[in-house]
Image: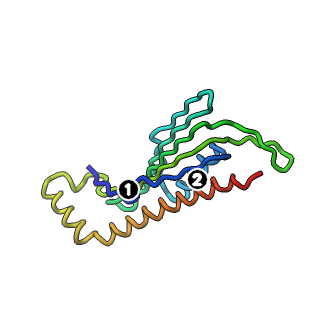
Amino acid sequence: MAEKLPIIQNVTMSYSGLFDVKELYSAINEWFKDKGYDRREIKNEEHVSPSGKFIDIEIMPYKKLSDYAKSVIRIQITMHDVKEVEIERDKHKVKLNQGSIEIIFDSYLETDYEGRWEQTPFYFFMRTVYDKFFYKNYTEHFEEMVASDTREMEAMIKSFLNMYRFRK
């Protein structure tokens, strides 16, 4: 079984106001595609109620950094009371969504994801020694890459949502 090293845990971001659900989802997918992540969608649920839609999305894209380590970023998006509204911009009517969003970011560095070093107790011991003394610099570099990607993703989503605050 692979070892998961938590890098960033439970970083929460909230937003309330106008946004476009489809554009947000496509912007997230495009960012992961540009960064070389393989998309993995865990959950995508939508419930309609009289107060609006409830949308729950969980995405866990991953990127192989080497034959030994891979980056995993978990994004959980929860949208409450999402309603479709029509606004006028530049004398054109535009349909947008209005509601509240909560996004939770977690990221992990997964080592020995193929389970090669856990076949025997001796291999497991050797992996521990190898990680502690020989591969430590590489692991630290990979941890920095995972943290950087997670912070960059969070900043991209913040700027995307803040863009809607200034649209009229």
* Amino acid at pointer 1: Tyr
In percent of width and height, residue 113 lies at: 31, 53
Residue 9, picture quadrant: bottom left
Q: Residue 29 appears at what percent x and percent y?
A: 56, 50
Indicate which label's residue lies in the foreground, 1 or 2: 1
| Horizontal side of residue 119 vs 42, given as left or right | left
Label 1 crowd bin: few (<14), some (14–19), many (20+), radius 10 Å:
many
Res 54 seen here: yes
164, above or below 147, in the image:
above
Vertical relation: 135 (above or below) 84 = below
Could you tell me if the residues under marks 1 and 2 are in contact, i.e. CB atoms within 8 Å?
no
In terms of sequence position, does the residue under pointer 1 or pointer 2 come before the other? Answer: 2
**Front residue of 128 and 153:** 153
Mark 1 and mark 2: span between their CA atoms? 21 Å
Q: Position of residue 111 (x, y in %)?
A: 31, 58
Q: Nearer the viewer, residue 13 or 111?
A: 13
Count of numbered tags: 2
Mark seen at residue 108: 1
Q: In this view, does 11 lie to the left or right of 125?
A: right
Q: Position of residue 18 (x, y in %)?
A: 68, 46
Q: In which quarter of the image is residue 135?
A: bottom left
Residue 163 as seen in the image, left or right of residue 128:
right
Q: Which residue is drawn at 50% across and 57% down?
A: 36
At numbered mark 1, what does the secondary structure look like: helix, strand or loop? Answer: strand
Check the image and name the residue furthest to the left: 122
Kindly identify the residue that appears in the image at 13 percent across and 58 percent down: 122
For the residue marked with disc 2, what is the amino acid? Answer: Glu
Residue matched to label 2:
30
Between residues 36 and 141, which one lies in front from this camera angle? 141
User: How busy is the neighbourhood of tag 2: few (under 14 within 10 Å), some, or many (20 plus)?
Assistant: few
Residue at coordinates 24% horizontally, 71% vertically from top-left? 134
